[in-house]
Image: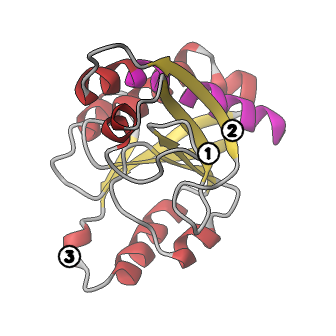
Amino acid sequence: MKNIVILISGGGSNMAAIVREAQRGHWGERLGARVAAVVSNRAGAGGLVFAREQGIATAVVDHKAFPSREAFDAALAETIDAHAPALVVLAGFMRILTPGFVERYQRRLLNIHPSLLPAFPGLHTHQRAIDAGCRFGGATVHQVTTELDVGPILEQAVVPILPGDTADALAARVLTQEHLIYPRAIARLLHATG
């Protein structure tokens, strides 16, 4: 069985979309894969409740308990590795990971970013797209590399920017597309890796 470990920091809506699609799409039978664990850097992350309700193992590795990024990433990796992951999926995990961590999970570490990469890496993507006069925004699923938001693109969704759009309105429309493309990209990658 190919184990998927999902990392979250908050409500975990993308994580929930992945779990639901794994159930609906019978990933266990069809792809030999399952969401094995959900790990958060915040004990109060709402997504942990959903994961527990689905019978998925959960863990918290609080970044504030460690003296450095390296120490946190080492503890995080130990927690992840206990589940022998085929994929490590970042779903609203609000920590920048060290190069050593990224290299440890090279080609197995995925992220979703709320823009059409390579446009607008980093934060405040929706407002930046609106301010730049873009006609479209969107979301990108990509493999994580040591350079922020530039890894190989696996899937994208395009969302129109409407006249008078706010960052929040655009973000809400993009999020609905994230919930579709992230599980699809994961399933496609699992299928491709046999």
The secondary structure type at the circle numbered 3 is helix
Residue 38 image position (x, y, % from top left): 40, 46
Q: Residues within 10 Å of mark 3 (few under 14, many from 20)?
A: few
Q: Which segment is the magenta one?
A: 174-194
Residue 142 badge? 1
Q: Earlier in the sequence, mark 3 or mark 1?
A: 3
The picture places residue 136, in percent across and down from the top left corner, at 49, 24
- 3 or 1: mark nearer the eye: 1
Asked whether the beta carbons under mark 2 and mark 1 sit within 8 Å of each other, the answer is: yes
- In this view, which residue lies farthest toward the bottom? 67
Q: Is residue 88 above or below residue 162?
A: below
Find residue 167 and report its image quarter: top left
Contact between labelled residues 1 and 3, with CB atoms less than 8 Å apart: no
The x and y percentages for residue 5 are 50, 48
Q: Mark 2 — residue?
A: 154
The amino acid marked with disc number 2 is: Leu
Mark found first going from the N terminus, 3 or 2: 3
Whichever of labels 2 and 1 marks the residue nearer the N terminus, that label is 1
Amino acid marked by disc 1: His
The local crowd at label 1, few if under 14, some if 14 to 19, many if 20 or more residues have their Cα within 10 Å, is: many
In three-dimensional space, the C-alpha distance between marks 3 and 2, rounded to whole angstroms, equals 34 Å
Check disc 3 and report the residue beneath it.
65
Residue drawn 49% across and 60% down? 80
Distance Cα–Cα, label 3 vs label 1: 29 Å
| Magenta stretch, overall SS | helix
Mark 3 or 2, which is nearer the eye?
Answer: 2
Residue at the (18%, 53%) spot, across then down: 43
Q: The residue tagged with tag 1: helix, strand or loop? A: strand
